[in-house]
Amino acid sequence: MQLCRAFMLIPLFLLMMAVNQCESEDMDHDGWSIDDGDCNDEDDTVYPGANEICNGIDNDCDDTLADETCYWDEAKWGESTWD
């Protein structure tokens, strides 16, 4: 009976290895994986250090949206021209 349990653990171990490899894979091919700090690995414009653009998305993964030069006009994001 002990031998059967040991064989059952081998596939579980291989499955766990495959899951760990998938977690560190760069799904959007932007050079950053979730493990590296990519906060949205389905969007190649979102990764640590990315240029922040006025789109309502945290492009650079710093937990803030675009900087103070952006505004929302009820229709879209845009750059302000305020000095």
Image (tube, rainbow, N blue to C red):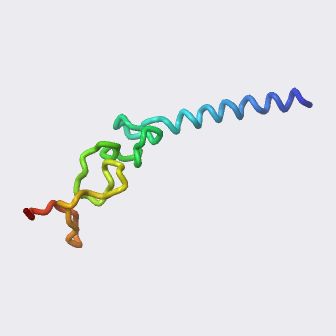
Judge from the rendering whether residue 15 lies leftward or rightward of residue 52; answer left or right. Answer: right
Judge from the rendering whether residue 39 lies leftward or rightward of residue 73; answer left or right. Answer: right
Q: Position of residue 29 (x, y in %)?
A: 37, 36
Residue at image x 38%, y 40%? 28
Residue at image x 40%, y 43%? 38
Q: Is residue 2 shown above or below 82?
A: above
Q: Position of residue 76 (x, y in %)?
A: 22, 66
Label count reads 0
Quadrant of the frame with the N terminus? top right
Quadrant of the frame with the C terminus? bottom left
Residue at image x 71%, y 31%? 11
Q: Is residue 43 shown above or below 56?
A: above
Q: Residue furthest bottom?
A: 74
Q: Position of residue 37 (x, y in %)?
A: 42, 42
Judge from the rendering whether residue 61 lies leftward or rightward of residue 22; answer left or right. Answer: left
Q: Residue furthest right?
A: 1
Q: Nearer the viewer, residue 79 or 15?
A: 79
Q: Position of residue 49 (x, y in %)?
A: 30, 42
Residue at image x 86%, y 30%? 4
- Kindly indicate the quadrant of the structure image that contains residue 56: bottom left
